Amino acid sequence: MSFLLTTLALFAQADAAPPQQPSILPMILMTALLFGIIYFLMIRPQQRADAARRAMQARIKKNDHVVTTGGIKGVVTSVKDDEVTLKVDEANNVRIRFTRSSIAAILSEADEKPGAEGGGEGKK
């Protein structure tokens, strides 16, 4: 009996249409969707941040209070094409030259004053 069922199953498979090749279209659509997600979640925000950083570095002018990427705070004394000179010590007139791309942020006057952090120094 089992031989008969096996034979019938083989004949049924022989009469059935041959299996179709899987379509490549869903794979292409998923790949395009993945690249779109990566672009909007990773690449585009990074491009915006870079553009904002370049704009900030382009508007550096004399007497701005800045902080470098290394954490050095100073006052801009001169700005040339790609070079910024910072005064970092008033008492000894210490000046350091940096490339414009080394400036991480322009600080406001409130950021430069001692005690601006609000740490409550001197209070008990």
Image: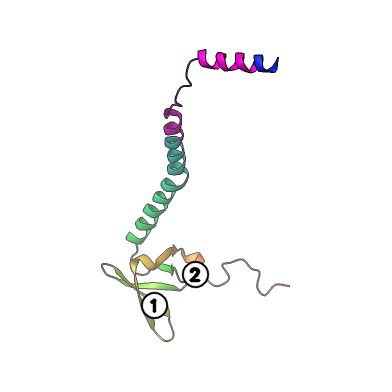
Q: Which residue range is magenta in the image? A: 6-30
**How many marks are shown on the rendered structure?**
2
User: Quadrant of the image for the N terminus?
Assistant: top right
Majority secondary structure in the magenta region: helix
**Residue 36 appears at what percent x and percent y?**
43, 38
Q: Is residue 79 above or below residue 15?
A: below
**Residue 95 appears at what percent x and percent y?**
37, 80
User: Quadrant of the image for the C terminus?
Assistant: bottom right
Residue drawn where x is 43% and y is 31% of the image: 29
Is 17 covered by the magenta stretch? Answer: yes
Q: Hey, which quadrant is residue 40 in on the image? A: top left
Give residue 112's mark: 2
Give residue 87's mark: 1
**Residue 32 appears at what percent x and percent y?**
42, 36
Give residue 107's mark: none
Task: Name the residue furthest bottom.
Answer: 92
Residue 16 lies left or right of residue 36; in this view the side is right
